[in-house]
Image (tube, coloured by chain):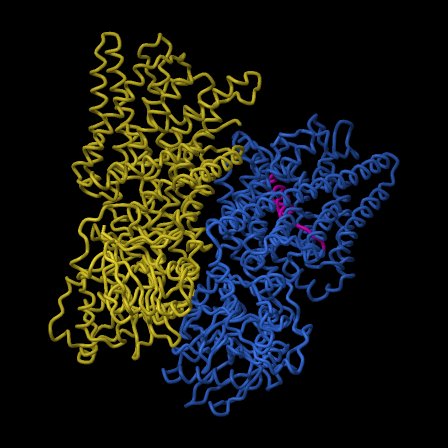
Chain colours: A yellow, B blue
Amino acid sequence: YYAEAQYVSLREAPAYDSRNAPTIHQAVRVLRKNASDACDSLFHSLLLYVKCFNGSKIVSSHITEVRGDALMLFFPRPLQDPIRGRPKEIPHNEKLLSLKYESLDYDNIENQLFLEEERRMSPMGFRCLEISRWVICGLIGILTGLIACFIDIMVEKLAGYKYQVIKENIEKFTEVGGLSISLILWAVLNCAFVLVGGIMVAFFEPIAAGSGIPQIKCYLNGVKIPRVVRLKTLVVKVIGVICSVAGGLAVGKEGPMIHSGGVVAAGVSQGRSTSLKRDFKMFEYFRRDTEKRDFVSAGAAAGVSAAFGAPVGGVLFSLEEGASFWNQMLTWRIFFASMISTFTLNFFLSIYHGKPGDLSNPGLINFGRFESGLLGALFNSLNYWLTIFRIRYVHRPCLQVMEALLVAAVTAAVSFTMIYFSNDCQPLGPERNEEYSLQLFCADGEYNSMATAFFNTPERSVRSLFHYQPGSYNPMTLGLFTLTYFFLACWTYGLAVSAGVFIPSLLIGAAWGRLCGILLASFTPTSPIWADPGKYALIGAAAQLGGIVRMTLSLTVIMVEATGNVTYGLPIMLVLMIAKIVGDYFQEGLYDIHIKLQSVPFLHWEAPATSHWLTAREVMSSPVTCFNRIEKVGTIVDVLSNTSTNHNGFPVVVQPAKLCGLILRSQLIVLLKHKVFVELARSRLSQRKLQLKDFRDAYPRFPPIQSIHVSQDERECMMDLTEFMNPTPYTVPQDTSLPRVFKLFRALGLRHLVVADDVNRVIGLVTRKDLARYHLGKHGLEELQLAQT
Amino acid sequence: YYAEAQYVSLREAPAYDSRNAPTIHQAVRVLRKNASDACDSLFHSLLLYVKCFNGSKIVSSHITEVRGDALMLFFPRPLQDPIRGRPKEIPHNEKLLSLKYESLDYDNIENQLFLEEERRMSPMGFRCLEISRWVICGLIGILTGLIACFIDIMVEKLAGYKYQVIKENIEKFTEVGGLSISLILWAVLNCAFVLVGGIMVAFFEPIAAGSGIPQIKCYLNGVKIPRVVRLKTLVVKVIGVICSVAGGLAVGKEGPMIHSGGVVAAGVSQGRSTSLKRDFKMFEYFRRDTEKRDFVSAGAAAGVSAAFGAPVGGVLFSLEEGASFWNQMLTWRIFFASMISTFTLNFFLSIYHGKPGDLSNPGLINFGRFESGLLGALFNSLNYWLTIFRIRYVHRPCLQVMEALLVAAVTAAVSFTMIYFSNDCQPLGPERNEEYSLQLFCADGEYNSMATAFFNTPERSVRSLFHYQPGSYNPMTLGLFTLTYFFLACWTYGLAVSAGVFIPSLLIGAAWGRLCGILLASFTPTSPIWADPGKYALIGAAAQLGGIVRMTLSLTVIMVEATGNVTYGLPIMLVLMIAKIVGDYFQEGLYDIHIKLQSVPFLHWEAPATSHWLTAREVMSSPVTCFNRIEKVGTIVDVLSNTSTNHNGFPVVVQPAKLCGLILRSQLIVLLKHKVFVELARSRLSQRKLQLKDFRDAYPRFPPIQSIHVSQDERECMMDLTEFMNPTPYTVPQDTSLPRVFKLFRALGLRHLVVADDVNRVIGLVTRKDLARYHLGKHGLEELQLAQT
């Protein structure tokens, strides 16, 4: 593959498609190692030369030797047409960066239209805007709370019905024999639920699969994940999660709740639904990425708040995920939304339970009131290999549904077997009459202890592990349960069903935590400190969850708020921090793994530490397609129609190449659609001037360029971009180091950053993908490859 | 004053010192209202003209009318020499912006030296740095915890001794008469303590006065408050706060604890003490503002954590105050520091109390465990007027100490009077034997209820208000106590003693909260919900504190963590939010008032909403003093010695005026000190090259230019700035709107932002003061005046 090596001098350098070549920084490193100052500039010239010649981004060129002004280079393949030569099938691995994701325009487009609107607005107008922001956050909180309430009640109803039927069936057949019929009944019921959920997800809206937290993370990071905040996604997600939890899979409903909160926020804040084609003519000011993203972070916080009864935890979750855009007013709004959300949920749940006003049930999983990392990494590693396998082989919807059914059936079978062969009988106390306790082969007045763990919704199992008094479980039961549930949960996460990983993690952790507690107590029978295994269950749950998802601050607060007791704050913090440190040593967090495997251009908090020697000149894309301030319509249409480049931001220049603004594809599309041409404006003086409203109406689903008809005459017209371009784009000099570029980009949430030379001429453009490519691997800085996945 | 009005054309515009003129935006507004496009450019030309002519920043010019190319302007005073004419004495008000505060250099100076060092560093080197950051945070936590422990124990000891003596004295004289001797004894003891604290603060380190939270807020905001993080300040602060709490003033020790945490962090992270002239040769990498500021925020969080036993609250406090610089790694470190701090405090306190391992005492003011805003604005308004009075008249140290003594004596007298005339006797329960309960005129086995509130340290009073069972206080007692304590606390805050406002606020709030609870209970005697007045005390305390300091998220978490119970989270949040909304309507928060009255150029979260029509052109300082890349030493020395300008950042240009870098005063000073001149370098080839270490050694107390001797010969030498300047300063075009400039400046924590024209020539410089000048007043946008305060 890397067979061809040749000497290239500056004058005869061929332009190769070097997509799969070793990375640029290796080349530079090799060069720097054995090169003088002269070679340095030589190398730069070469790079520029090859870039210009090729006409497209050069990813790398492997330079092994310097001889005079010639360099020895490795090129993997001979020159191909850049479009035709793009490989159709790429062996999937984590070293890829997908080209299909675009960025959000978090930077305000401060063009003349916008500034005029802002300047016309009175202080009172700004105050009204501020009030409507608070109103929207209130609505987000209320709706998210209601959705959480709906999911909660539906799951309880359906699961209750299912367990009741099976319980009766088991009781019927325990004495007479023929429990295999019960097993089949259980498996069939599970499969039926999962079938509905799986078909919804696999055929109608695949983005609704999984917990949704990685997607929300990406969205808050500034990546536009297609269809992630649509109404359809929300509906599929809600039905899907109800089905998968009721279907007995090893899943929780908390992650989907957070995603739901985000979708609600994106919908409410826009004052319309594109899917339903309804426009309420409200909140038009908020129809841009900047504002929408802020509301989505509020929605995510509201989701956390509803899922765990943890308003402060919700705020911190949103902060940890999208904090580069933090500002204080926003935080308060997020906080407000979280509060309203918990409140609404509690209020309606208390009415449902027939005790209006009793607000003692904060959140779906209130662990109740307490009176007083290695496994995570393993989980993540297993799931990592499983996910790769799935991406490669299980990509057809039918297969995905079938896998989900298989898991559902296996879960039922395993659970049944475990219960069947367990002989851990416990006396039936008076406080446990609500649960679906199975007697099975136990004596009268006793119940099967294994069944409380398996024959139950995961939330109830967690609660029983935390709260049942010492002696409710024997160590053997817990050990077997931990082992089987671990593998079941690991297999389940990543299935094409809506499913969260919080509760299964907590359950695994609680089981082995309680196991540890029991073992410790048996070693030190005199000390009363080790008395309550429920406390160990809590700490174990925190450790397991922390080891899998690797959050610290927000997770601590969530756990503390969910348990309703600050006393365990310190041990929980410690355990989470240790779980994170140990886990990070072996494997990344589960969400990060999934983000990486989707090849999302995710920007981390800082540039890699060892990237100071890279400058804007090396990372930027160049040459850049620019437009003149007054540009021919035909040129614009041709550039936009070029599918091989598919650029989204175009610097606007005045001759000679001097930067004077930046315009986006979406803006140009709207301009073309409304035919804002100089000649037309002259002939039809009465024509309505294009306003911000026209851009807002088209947001966020701008039509593709192909749908806009431009006649041959119109192609000869001119378009004046002055009024619509952003006249003050951020720029950096070409010598700016990568960490500096990264900081500017990340702190301001940019989508395009223009690289200018010392007389303000455009020489390159830095986008998210140019920055996300570099990451710190095991052997120093590595560069990901761009690919069409 | 505004008598003179005249017509000015472009050619004859005089240059006025228009410091006290109406603000620039009013002028622009008037102009825009009745002006055509032509006038717009006319106005800009005029502004530029006046600026150039005057040679110094023009603040404003009031344009009322446009006639041809002449504008009617108001100028308050005729032309004066800009230096000689600067008023020596300015009537102090809040519409000023002090010139004496400089900014921190939060932006990394990525010059060649720095980049070389970073590039030389291996991945292992970066990992070691990371580890030392964690070690430092651990040390900060431990030391802050120890200091908190020391303050706590000392206050308990001294106050215990004092109350014991007075109690014995009162008991002696209650029967025989002559209680006036007790009053005098009490007043003298109080005054003695306050005298020590007052003298320390007023004569040795005035910056140690007050709670220190406004100062830390400013520091985290990026303002360099002189001497705020020095060792001397810490010592004075610790002694001062012990004296003022033991002296019976209406103060708390929590605010000073936060300040102490900040000082500890600034000291530890530098690995040396400039005051003690000790250099441990450690942590040299962290000797710059960027790193130091991050550690100070960790220290502040550790302080909160130690003061309230609230680690998460500490993180949120630091975030709310300095969040523009948030990044995740930093948060974790802050979190870690908070944790260590609480842990250390608890550990040592438990040893002190003789119960090692009993960690149930998280923080100085653990409100204990619960089983189940208008006043703030008034407080702030009163304190506002008092502070203005103090700034105008009580500025001599002697006067300050005398005022402190007066307050101490009055506090003792009022307390005594209240106790003396109170006839609220309560039976002495078994659980109250530890307190200094006064019998006075009560029957045997009873104690004076008023005395539990007044004759006690404020923390204990708060705790008793929260926890004593219903009936321990009668409404009259509480009402009188609230009233008197309110005025005492208001008078006390701002005295020249180290003192916090958290505890007094809590105490006032707890008293009226309990009062409300009792009154409600008396109206609805049947309902058991109103039974516990302690809960009302808690909510009242939260409301009062929230109304005074106006924090929401962090304060909620602090209160919840301090009470050790999540149950009250929701009501506390609600109450804090309402207190903030109501309070903000009338008056700002106490800390913001004090920051404003100190005329600190504090940058808020966002630019004022109505500032979109202001652009960089209007807000920037111009003309800018620039240096050539190779500059004459004499020129540099002259510019640095010019006390009238006192600039700190200088753009470096290549002819003709093209920007190529930015260099700081501090760097130039080091270069001059080491005589890094081109000629000398040529003659002494073996000369040691200047390294980053030389800059780090000089940090943070760079010598003044006057202390550096440059001979006449050396003045003729040249200096090459290429290697030392930051070659990639951030720039904006001159048309950038103020909110956009503000966002860039705030998000990146800049000190200087260069304004460049379309061919990259320097035309202005934006600094913190240029941005902090604009704020939203009652009549729209207002502009503060710069002044030498």
From where the camera sits, is residue B679 visible?
yes
Image quadrant where residue B152 sits: top right
* Residue visible at 31% across and 18% down in the picture: A418
Left or right of A402 on screen, residue B621: right
Look at the picture and state if A98 lies above or below B64: above
> x and y percent of residue A636 in the render?
20, 70
Q: Quadrant of the C terminus of chain B?
A: bottom right
Q: Quadrant of the N terminus of chain B?
A: bottom right
> x and y percent of residue A389 in the render?
25, 38
From where the camera sits, is residue B567 visible?
no
Left or right of A472 on screen, residue B709: right
> x and y percent of residue A696 in the render?
27, 61
* Residue visible at 61% across and 76% down in the picture: B640
Image quadrant where residue B477 sits: top right
Predominant secondary structure, magenta span: helix
Left or right of A760 on screen, residue B473: right
Q: Residue furthest bottom?
A: B11
Instruction: Check if residue B499 falls in the magenta segment.
Output: yes
Q: How many marks?
A: 0
> x and y percent of residue B244 in the render?
73, 49
- Front-lying residue, A515 or B494: A515
* Residue visible at 61% across and 59% down in the picture: B594
- Front-lying residue, B377 or B463: B463
The region drawn magenta spans B497-516
Q: Residue furthest front?
A: A67
Left or right of A594 on screen, residue B449: right
* Residue visible at 76% across and 61% down in the picture: B397
Look at the picture and state if B97 lies above or below A104: below
Instruction: Check if residue B250 falls in the magenta segment.
Output: no
- Front-lying residue, A222 or A458: A222
